[in-house]
Amino acid sequence: MVKQVTAWMASMAAASGLAACGGEPAPAPSPTTSVSPDDPMPAITGPERRILAFGDSLFAGYGLQEGESYPARLEIALRARGVNARVTNAGVSGDTTQAGLQRLPFTLDNGGDYDLAIVELGGNDLLRQLPPAQTRANLRAILDELQERDIPVLLMGLRAPPNLGAQYQGAFDAIYPDLAREYDAELVPFFLESVWNRPQLIQQDRVHPTADGIEAMVAATVDEVAAAVPQPD
């Protein structure tokens, strides 16, 4: 899986002229942290809002210390905004959409009630160059399961690198916005937008975000997550 992800990140970097084939990459601004110690902390009110973070290694916290994963940092950022959030990390490294679909019922059956599910899957399908129609079908089945259980969804979108060809890229990139419209789900168009072309925010494996990278990703998406959390009755 790591070799596959590395190839993808390298191809994404090459596509944007950032591949390290000579010379140093251009410097980028320091990441914006999701929570600043100088920020005033609003009062946390209302009932607890339970959020399921369902994804792959980008949620699991591959290569990070405990408490540095995206779900862990997202919970802190939401609470800093006054949202009484508890985020459950259900990220499994290496999961394809098919693997996620297979484990979703067990995850839901054993996790209690959730107010929101954040679905972040498809990267490993992309790395294996699985047919986009297969990825779409699996994600649709995941959304069907969540819809049947009356759990609102926030989709974390991904994009294919152009070196896979225009036909593949177009078919893959359309999956997330299409499904978001079909299921009336909220959407982050490109989950890796804040880090994919900033090598200083990627671990030495050239794949997974560093702790600073996670902070940048949380800062870039926390507003969308907060907006997607249903208000208590």
Image (spheres, rainbow, N blue to C red):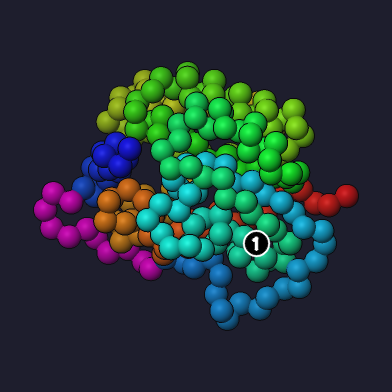
Q: What residue is rendered at 47% in x and 66% in y?
A: 32
Residue 74, placed above or below residue 173: below
Q: What residue is rendered at 24% in x and 49% in y?
A: 18
Q: What residue is rendered at 43% in x and 42% in y?
A: 93
Residue where numbered disc 1 is placed? 78
Q: What residue type is labelled 1?
A: Leu
Of residues 156 and 174, the one drawn nearer to the viewer in this rendering: 156
Q: Give the range drawn in magenta.
A: 20-30
Residue 117 lies in quadrant: top right
Q: What residue is rendered at 33% in x and 56% in y?
A: 202
| Left or right: where 27 falls relative to 153 | left
Of residues 39 and 104, the one drawn nearer to the viewer in this rendering: 104
Residue 127, placed above or below residue 76: above
Q: In x, y percent, where is residue 157?
A: 51, 39
Q: In x, y percent, where is residue 27?
A: 27, 64
Residue 57 visible in the displayed image: yes
Q: In x, y percent, where is residue 113?
A: 76, 44
